[in-house]
Amino acid sequence: MFDFAWFDSRLSSSDFRSHWWAAVQLMNVGADGLAHLPRLLDLCERFDHQSRLTDREESFILYGARSSGRIVHSVGYSDRESLHQRVANWIMSLVDSPNIQVAAAGTWGMGELGVPPASISKRLHELIGSDERFDATGKHSLRSIAFRMLARIDRDAAAQLVESTACHEYIADVRQWIAASRARPANHYDREPELLAEAGWLLTDEDG
């Protein structure tokens, strides 16, 4: 059961940890979270994502982007709704941040928001085709995340890009994640089924 007062108290709190936890939980409430979306965006937009942020602040922006995208997607995006436009504009602005973690958060947010708006698909295609940024480990690229998000919202469009570098990098990531899951003890959470459900169409028999 959705607890309006619980979210209201945490988003109104002066404690940043409460804001972070509310943003995490709003990922799972769907349209019920719409009433809290303006406050969530207020909290997200106060961060200057062009400057250095703490790990927790980056995490908050990630969950804020994913939650706000999911909430708007759940009610159906409309160009007539200024709040929906605000969400889309904020999420897409994150992708241009020099902070790769923030840019990745924006890319995830675009995947949660989906299409419409058509600008989401266009921006994902741009990232797949031309972005060359990697995370701090040098192993995971922003374009691979963009391909993953495009595949979620438009499989047919992603299927036209299976020969792209972004797709190849995403497949390499999936294989690495599956191998790591198989190496974990039996009593740990097995990610392989969900990874295969999402990306199995890109893998070969050799990955079985």
Image (cartoon, rainbow, N blue to C red):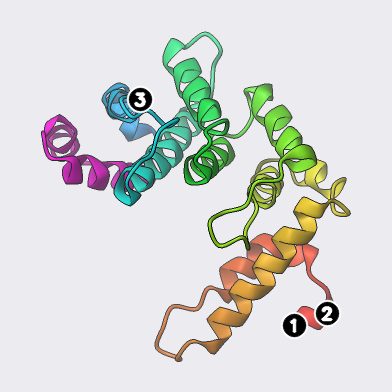
Q: Quadrant of residue 33?
A: top left
Q: Looking at the rendered structure, which numbered label has been put on residue 76?
A: none
Most foreground residue, 189 or 58: 58
Q: Measured from the top left, where is residue 195 in percent x and y?
A: 61, 67
The answer to whether the residues at label 2 and label 1 have Cβ atoms under 8 Å apart is yes
| Residue 1 seen from this side | no
Name the residue rendered at 44%, 36% in the picture: 65
Amino acid tagged 3: Glu
Q: Which mark is residue 45?
A: 3
In 3D space, how far apart are the residues under numbered discs 2 and 3 (Cα atoms)?
A: 45 Å
Depth check, front residue: 9 or 50? 50
Q: Position of residue 87 (x, y in %)?
A: 46, 24
Which residue type does callout 2 highlight?
Asp
Q: CA distance from mark 2 to mark 1?
A: 5 Å
Nearer the camera: disc 1 or disc 3: 3
On the question of residue 170 being in view, the answer is yes
Q: Determine whether, in the image, residue 53 is placed left or right of residue 158.
A: left
Name the spot of residue 74 as percent of width and height, x first: 47, 34
Single out the residue that lies furthest toward the front.
Answer: 52
Q: Residues within 10 Å of mark 2 (few under 14, many from 20)?
A: few
Residue located beneath label 1 in the image: 208
**Above or below — where is 68 with respect to 55?**
above
Tag 2 residue: 205
Q: At numbered mark 3, what does the secondary structure look like: helix, strand or loop?
A: helix
Q: Give the residue at x 66% y 41%.
A: 153
Instruction: Check disc 1 and give the amino acid type.
Output: Gly
Front: mark 2 or 3 = 3
In primary-sequence order, the first of circles 1 and 3 is 3
Secondary element under disc 1, as helix, strand or loop, is: loop
